[in-house]
Image (cartoon, grey):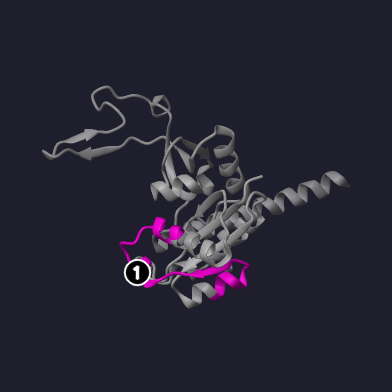
């Protein structure tokens, strides 16, 4: 089995929702949900949080993640997540001579994903012989845009010949939750997408990405629904047993 490290970049300077990564959701800081699922994933050997923030570091360690402190130059609004990943890899190689085979890049702004989604994305990359993989969710919408002349036009459909939504060509939306890359290719490309690409499909109810305060409200409702479904299942199984 390949050596797999999960890296969760989480800087302290979020703008739309201040202190977003430690904002409470379903009784836990936002980042805790991703850490716990990463630690449950069977394919993952290590879980590391990359951060420039002392509170995020403390919370991450409390929930069982290792922490690599990120330099300020890699923590600005314009610094890419790839820079954070590269910094972690460089740090671990220099200090521990540690070199994983695969990197699982996780974004804690997708708190509803499950460990099976992480394992599924890793498995998809390996089974497909891919170099990089990402999570997606089915997309069934009609997209529009304004062209350079200001004219409104359809992107994924012909506005003149209206078709049924279910007749659109099968499309997928990137969830922003999970990316898996082969280390050697990533070090060369310095980008999460390179070589042969594979997709792991997740359902819509696990694909929410937290960007605004309203997203926390939606996520809270989805967590409550998940909890309710677990209770119903336990009650049913108990009734069947007796």
Q: In this figure, what is the number of numbered marks? A: 1
- Residue at 61 percent of width and 59 percent of height: 46
Where in the figure is residue 64, as x and y percent of width and height?
A: 63, 67
Queried whether the magenta region covers residue 50, the answer comes back as: no
In terms of image quadrants, where is residue 145? top left
Where in the figure is residue 234, as x and y percent of width and height?
A: 76, 51
For this rendering, which residue is in front, 46 or 99?
A: 99
Where in the figure is residue 212, as x and y percent of width and height?
A: 39, 61
| 142 relative position to 5: left or right | left
Task: Say if residue 33 shows up in the picture.
Answer: no
Q: Secondary structure at mark 1?
A: helix
For this rendering, which residue is in front, 54 or 110?
A: 54
Vertical arrangement, residue 102 with respect to residue 219, above or below: above
- Residue at 82 percent of width and 50 percent of height: 238
Magenta segment boundaries in residue numbering: 58-86
Task: Say if residue 85 shows up in the picture.
Answer: yes
- Residue at 52 percent of width and 39 percent of height: 201
- Around disc 1, counting alpha carbons within 10 Å, would you say few (fewer than 14), some (14 to 19), or many (20 or more)? few
Residue indicated by mark 1: 73
User: Is the N terminus in the top left, top right, bottom left or bottom right quadrant?
Assistant: top right
| 51 relative position to 99: left or right | left
Vertical arrangement, residue 36 with respect to residue 115, above or below: below
Vertical arrangement, residue 62 with respect to residue 46, above or below: below
């Amino acid at each position: 089995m390949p050596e797999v490290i999960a890296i969760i970049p989480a800087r302290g300077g979020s703008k739309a929702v201040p202190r977003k990564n430690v904002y409470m959701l379903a009784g836990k800081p936002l980042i805790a949900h991703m850490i716990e699922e990463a630690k449950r994933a069977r394919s993952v050997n290590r879980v590391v949080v990359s951060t420039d923030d002392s509170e995020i570091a403390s919370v991450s360690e409390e929930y069982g993640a290792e922490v690599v402190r990120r330099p300020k130059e890699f923590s600005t609004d314009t610094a890419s997540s790839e820079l954070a990943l590269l910094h972690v890899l460089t740090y671990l190689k220099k200090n521990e001579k540690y070199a994983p085979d695969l990197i699982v890049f996780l974004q804690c702004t997708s708190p509803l994903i499950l460990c099976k989604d992480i394992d599924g994305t890793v498995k998809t990359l390996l089974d497909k012989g891919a170099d990089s993989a990402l999570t997606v969710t089915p997309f069934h919408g009609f997209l529009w845009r304004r062209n350079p002349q200001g004219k409104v036009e359809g992107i994924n459909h012909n506005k003149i010949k209206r078709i049924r939504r279910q007749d659109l060509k099968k499309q997928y939306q990137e969830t922003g939750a999970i990316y898996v890359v082969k280390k050697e290719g990533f070090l060369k490309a310095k980008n999460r997408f390179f070589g042969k690409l594979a997709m792991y499909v997740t359902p819509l109810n696990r694909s929410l990405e937290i960007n605004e305060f309203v997203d926390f409200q939606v996520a809270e409702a989805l967590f409550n629904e998940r909890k309710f479904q677990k209770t119903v299942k336990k009650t049913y199984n108990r009734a069947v047993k007796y």
